[in-house]
Amino acid sequence: MRKLLAAAVALAPLAIAAGAAHADTEISNTRTTPILTANANNGEADDVVITNGGTLRIATGVAATLNSDNDITIANGGLIQMEDAEDGATAILAEGGNSGSIEVNGLISITEDHEGEDEDEDGDLDGPFAIGSDRYGIRVVGAEALDGGITVGRQGAITVEGNNSYGIFNEAGLTGDLVMRGSVTMTGDGSYAIRSTGNVDGDVWVGGAITARGEDTVGVSLEGDIGGSLRIDGNITVTGFRYTGRSANEEAVEALDEDDLLIGGPAVRISGNVAGGVLLATTAPPVEDEDEDDDEENPDTDGDGVPDSEQTTASITSFGSAPAIEIGSETRDITLGLVGADELAYGFINRGGVTASGVYDGVEATGIQIGVAGGNAVTIEGGFRNEGGVEARSREAAATAVRFGAGATTPILYNSGTILGGAVTDGGHDATAILVEAGASLPALYNSGRLQSVLTGALGDAVTIRDLSGTLTQIDNIGVIQATTVSTRDEDGEVIPAEGQRVAIDVSANTTGVTLTQLLLETDPEDPPASGITSPVISGDILLGSGADTVDIRDGFVYGNIDFGSGADRLLISGDAEVRGALSATGGLLSIDVASGLLDAQQAGSLDISSLSVGADGDLILTIDPAAGRPAGSTCREPPVSRTAPVSAPASSRSWMIRPVTSSSRRACWNSAISTRARSRRTRPSCSWSRPGRMKPPARSTWTCAPHRRRDRHDPVGICGL
């Protein structure tokens, strides 16, 4: 980003120097004829400046043309106005092969005399958003690139009404930077606020405010290669809907016409290489008092290449089924290089907000899509890093916050922010936070923030992480991974229970083995983290594949069932961790080690395992059926673990707690205890109620089964049941 910074800082001094060298051709009042830089000064080439109070007003053709080695500038207060514009109207046309730049700090306005009417008298407007076409705010054409750049300053604004029209269209290419710090407002189908099919050798910086409305309309489309970096820190909103706010009156929603519910394109599309990566930026962090002197010496304390005083936060929004951000090409492979070093050593970094909203029934929502259907490979070097927010919400349709499509490749997804997929549906649609499709590659995922899926309705699943590619082999969590289903009510107020699955992690497609580690989160009670997360949590089911998987829970909580699939799997619990849910595995190869912490195994049946070890500080809770004297759901009088499994626990270990699941209150113990060194010897473990003084505990009370100490050198352990 250093090149972009230098260009931004040096912009004003360069303008002064140019002014000192020779007088520009100025438009300081109203001019109604076109102007060309090649003959602007009495037939001689010259820079053209529309000054404060100056207006260039025409209705057809091209208002200002850069066709020589000169610049075109619209100063603050200057205006190019094209009212009732004809098709093809262009405010500024730059011919490639020349050396010059375009700077807009004033206004470009290309409008038409068209307003929608309520033709069917149903209370909303009808008809197209625009009727004219092929209009351009700024256009760069030619077989060669323009030797220069385009800058729209903070006071600059471009408004274009028309179908298949453009705020800025770089067709030929730029050797300099493309900088948008002002605003672009587009109205019309198939239009683009900013489109670049030519290369940009420098940086692309998109700030300010961009709004585009119309069917298949796109906010920012970068299809050529970018030699520098892409930085976005502005507000970009795109939709094909006439109304982006859903009415609370369902009759009004049902009365909407087809032309009210058109689907726009992506808010941001990247289908070219970006050598310096993609950064969705935010404001610089506040400077501590003791660092104020350093801040005065270093105007860029966060090292992102832009002075802290100029930084704003990216907000990218798509209303409709098009992704808020789409990365990929149907015609070629693309690569996003690294943004920088250290914390910037990723090809894609989001520090802002990305939102996709389906708004209306049946409209899917996708936040960020990497890889396009039928497209080519997308490589994100260094990884995908989210420090901000990504959210997708829908009604009666699927919602996916982050989707890695076939051909997408990146080494890691790093999340310290929030990624949320939410859907309200009765039709069996899923709400997904992260989806890795078959043919994609994402080997690792690290989460210290919040990964969430919320499904509201009777049917449909809440899925937080789903890998269909089989490539995700390492997941580290010190944050929250949560899947939630929410019940609804019918017209009579009766609760309709949610029947869908709550899936926190689905890596069942993996065949090589997955390591899931929940790490210790160290926090200071006097200085709690801004995220509000004080303990790591996984809430929802965990589905593993056929490889040799390891689930290593060292801290925090796991609430949900764990299906280990087949393979030589391991469940490790240590620290103060708590794991509560039903365990399942096929093949009897599961090894369980509760060094410390708690395992609340809630499966309704026997579980064949290869080994079980409970440490001195470990607790094991088993759910059993006291009426039958066996594990809940079991068909024979067997303990909750296989008798053939080597089981170990020191005599000093804390209690094994066993709770009944029916109202019956009889007590029984299996007459078996297995020593790790002397399995042939049997002794009776001791069992007792957890509530002393009560002859018969009620349902769901807790039984305690303590190991019976043998009078030899072996450390026996009791396997108890009710």
Image: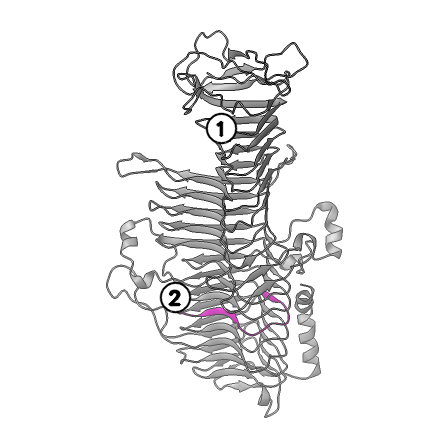
Query: Which residue is rendered at x = 36% and y = 58% of the image?
Result: 243
Question: Within 10 Å of the Cα at label 2, are there few (<14), some (14-19), or many (20+) other Cα atoms?
Answer: many
According to the picture, the residue beneath numbered tag 2 turns out to be 215
In the rendered view, would you say 142 is above or below 532? Answer: below
Front-most of residues 421 and 286? 421
Q: Residue furthest left?
A: 120
Asked whether residue 198 is drawn in magenta, I would say yes
Query: Which residue is rendered at x = 55% and y = 12% of the image?
Result: 685
Instruction: Locate residue 263 relative to residue 515 in the image: left or right.
Output: left
Rendered location of residue 80, percent (x, y): 50, 77
Residue 92 seen in this snapshot:
yes
Mark 1 falls on what kind of element? loop
Write the start and end of the magenta stretch as one range. 189-205
Instruction: Locate residue 412 relative to residue 398 in the image: left or right.
Output: right
Query: Which residue is rendered at x = 44% and y = 70% of the image?
Result: 191
Question: Within 10 Å of the Cα at label 1, are there few (<14), some (14-19), or many (20+) other Cα atoms?
Answer: many
What amino acid is found at the position of numbered circle 1 in the picture?
Leu
According to the picture, the residue beneath numbered tag 1 turns out to be 607
Q: Classify residue 356 by image quadrant.
A: bottom left
Residue 534 seen in this snapshot:
no
Q: In the rendered image, which quarter contains the N terminus? A: bottom right
Query: Which residue is rendered at x = 50% and y = 70% of the image?
Result: 158
Contact between marks 1 and 2 (CB within 8 A): the answer is: no
In the image, which is nearer the foreground, mark 1 or mark 2? 1
